[in-house]
Image (tube, rainbow, N blue to C red):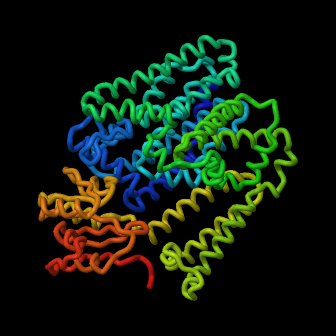
Amino acid sequence: MTPNAYRRSEHLRALWPWLPLWTAAALLAIFAHGPMPLFSTRTLAVAWEMWHGHHWLVPYVNGQPYSEKAPLLFWMIHAGWAVFGVSDVWPRVLEVGFGATQLVLVSTIARRLFPDRPWVASATPWMLLSLSYAFLFGLQIMYDVLLATWVLATLLCLLPTERRAEPRWWLFGLCIGFGLLTKGPVMLLHVVFPWLLGPLWNDWARTHRARWYGLGALGVLLGLAMLLAWAIPAGFSGGEAYRQRLFFTQTAARVVNGVAPAADLQNHARPLWWYLLAIPVLMFPLAAWPRAVAALAMLRRPLPSGMRFSLCWLVPAFVTFSLVSGKQLYYPLPELGGGCLLLAGAIALLRERHPQLASTAWLGTWPLALGGALLAVFMFVLPDLVASNRLHGEWFDEAVDYSRYFSVLFLLLGALLLLRGRGEMRRLAIAGLIGTLAFNTLFTLTAWHKYDLTPSTDLLAAAEAEQRPIAYLGAYDAQFHFAARLTRPITEIRGDAAIAAFAQAHPDGLIVTHPEKLTAADRRYALLVQPFRSSWIVIWPAPVLSDVQAGQQPPEPTTPTRIYPAPLRP
């Protein structure tokens, strides 16, 4: 066996422990319950409307062109539907595939950046799969998971291999293009800094600056050309209003005003330091691992090229996203792989430069073990606290039937983290993954019924089959369209006058409302009442709701209201 073939076989063997473990956990979690409103249901709704209406260029939502996102994810969903038929199974399998690809990519990146430190390539994917937020958000049918995959693939194209020091510029440009077709110009903010700062970490870039920047700029232009190859014909196909939003209100505003459109900037406005406080959440449980914190604190120059690459990627991206007014936890999702790469490299340096400090027990996983033990105790006594009226809340009251079973699991995970000896990082990763899967399972058993819109979508699907018009009081987020397979738009209405006008125009129509609390009229005259998150979904015959809103006595219903009881205990 040649040296290269031997190294490839070693790398394939290294995939065995973490890749099937993460894939099995992700499949169990993503199929434990249905697609989550409102993220996953909206993505599926857009894909469904494009599919049903044969709109291959322009995404649609609720009958209108959807300028918020580029179409690559929808095309990938359509490819699976063309083979397997329309369902939510393929999109969920697709998301799991994206996550698995990220693990392979980050392992390959670590292997190229730290060729003389194989532990980093082994540890980085373990660290990434341990992150609770990345795992849970990866269960959403969303663009950011695919975007993170293209970001890692783009950065991989910049890295030298054993045979070639120069980047593969055409692949660099193609991956940028696919990222742009996934979520638009924000793709550039994730990948442009390692390229612009290339001479700080890459020897070839330092000695071939003109070629590095010239061919890199051509790669960026190739990616932009791929985006324009879709956007220009889509703009003309979607009409004047869509074209204005796509090229100016959305695309230009994202670049000038900061990643998000104006409405999102207003709704998601956060202070400058918000992402700094979010780091412990995004990087949990690694953020609570003393060995990782100490390794970062002990970093000193000179730094290997892999560490310089990670810093050239993470620091400018963090500053840029912090300067943007609109902030969401999932915006820096592509950088989580870089964070794990930085931590793995820092721990490797700590072991080399401070071996005695790196081996001390107080840098182990005892804080996480203690946290697991305290959580186990709390979950064990939770039924007694609720029964004695010392603790109440919708989450606590619903968890009491299962909390003691899960307390045993978290106690075992805490014990696993207390074990000494080699394999500490893997034990931490396995405990983090299983603990996150346990929380997802507990959510499925106790709280999913408040997110399951099946009763409402069944009723709306029946109304669609009868050609009955449907309206929504307030802003409609397309949460019913895919599951009910709606083929007509739902009318958004606001105010009593709009309710009366809709009822007069459509006496056989239905109106969906989303009240915070139920009234006696909701329970008596509505067709259906079901809990939804911390509020309710109520579906009315349009004339009945108009009468109630006008203070008139509606006729007695011929069928009783279908009420799905509140999940809280009396």
Left or right of residue 66: residue 168: right
Residue plotted at (33% across, 64% down):
453
Residue plotted at (53% across, 18% down):
217
Quarter of the image where one finds residue 491: bottom left
**Is there any visible trace of residue 32 in the rendered image?**
yes
**Is there any visible trace of residue 115 in the rendered image?**
no
Quarter of the image where one finds residue 229: top left
Whole-percent x and y of residue 293? 75, 49
Whole-percent x and y of residue 59? 30, 39
Between 556 and 94, the one nearer to me in the picture = 556
Quadrant of the frame with the N terminus: top right
Left or right of residue 126: residue 467: left
Whole-percent x and y of residue 84? 28, 46
The count of marks equals 0
Extreme residue in the bottom direction = 388
Left or right of residue 477: residue 223: right
Quadrant of the frame with the C terminus: bottom left
Residue plotted at (82% across, 57% down):
361
Between 528 and 556, the one nearer to me in the picture = 556
Extreme residue in the right direction = 356
Whole-percent x and y of residue 289? 72, 54
Between 176 and 530, the one nearer to me in the picture = 530
Residue plotted at (73% across, 48% down):
292
**Is 535 placed above or below 242 here?**
below
**Is 396 placed above or below 27 here?**
below
